[in-house]
Image (cartoon, rainbow, N blue to C red):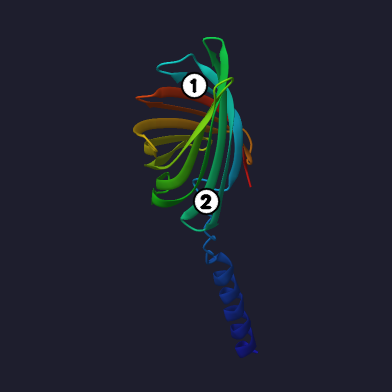
Amino acid sequence: MKTTLLTAAFSVLALAANAGAPSAKVPAAPAPVAEAFSYDFVEAGWVHVFPDQIDDLDGYYTHVSFSPVNNVFLFAEWGQAFGSELGADYDESSLELGAGAYLPICSTVDFVVTGAALRSEVDVDGFGSADEWGFDASAGFRIRLASKLELGLFYGFTHLDDSDVSSGSAGLVYGLTDAVDLTVRGSFSEDDQQLGVGIRYNF
């Protein structure tokens, strides 16, 4: 009888000790880290050009970017601007086809380089058209300023048949939704300055 009572008492004490002991914590799974920047998008917008030697032009642009593998992307851009000078209407158009690479410096900064083949054409009513072929290259940074705000800073070099031009550019990207961004971009060179506003869809 005493043995039974002692056994029961020890059992009660063991249960009480186990009930009061802190339970082991299971470590939480790390939250997935979202990519800082998208390289898969379609963008279209309006552009205003301030040439140095002729009147201002207004036009539009479309840009497509696609990243088939990590750290590499392909892109294409088409732009056209219209104006008039001395009573003659004219337009300028350009087409770029190229590729780029990006290297994350930290969670909020990517270093980006691009290179592209370039075709530029000028068409003047009554005087015909002329086109040039060349290439351009750029290097710069995409910087995440806030969860919905990005800054881009780039230096570019363009070579056409009879000219070499260096330029600087800056742009802001503001996230309206998870898939849609508002973009503002500007550039300056020895030949002209440009200001553009667009809408970007990330896919």
Tell me where residue 26 appears, x and y as whole percent: 54, 65
For image coordinates 60% across by 37% down, the residue present is 43
Q: Any mark on residue 74, and which?
A: 2
Nearer to us in this view, 88 or 105? 88
x and y, in percent, of residue 33 in the image: 51, 53
Q: Secondary structure at mark 2?
A: strand
Rendered-image quadrant of the N terminus: bottom right
- Camera sees residue 199: no
One can see residue 184 in this view: yes
Placement of 12 over or under 153, stated as above or below: below
Q: Is residue 74 above or below residue 147?
A: below
Depth check: 45 or 15 in front?
A: 45
Q: Amino acid at mark 2?
A: Leu
Q: Secondary structure at mark 1?
A: strand
Calculate the distance from the C-alpha at mark 1 to the C-alpha at mark 2: 26 Å
Instruction: Name, please, the residue furthest toward the front.
Output: 127
For mark 1, does the 10 Å Cα neighbourhood hold few (<14), some (14 to 19), or many (20 or more) residues? many
Tags 1 and 2 touching, CB below 8 Å:
no
**Residue drawn at (63%, 81%) of the image:** 8
Mark 1 lies on residue: 49
Would residue 56 be found to the left or right of residue 104 on screen? right
| Nearer to the camera, 161 or 109 | 161
User: Where is residue 59 drawn, in percent x and y?
Assistant: 58, 24
Q: Earlier in the sequence, mark 1 or mark 2?
A: 1
Looking at the picture, which amino acid does disc 1 mark?
A: Val
Q: Which mark is residue 28?
A: none
Q: Give the image location of residue 22, x and y in percent.
A: 52, 64
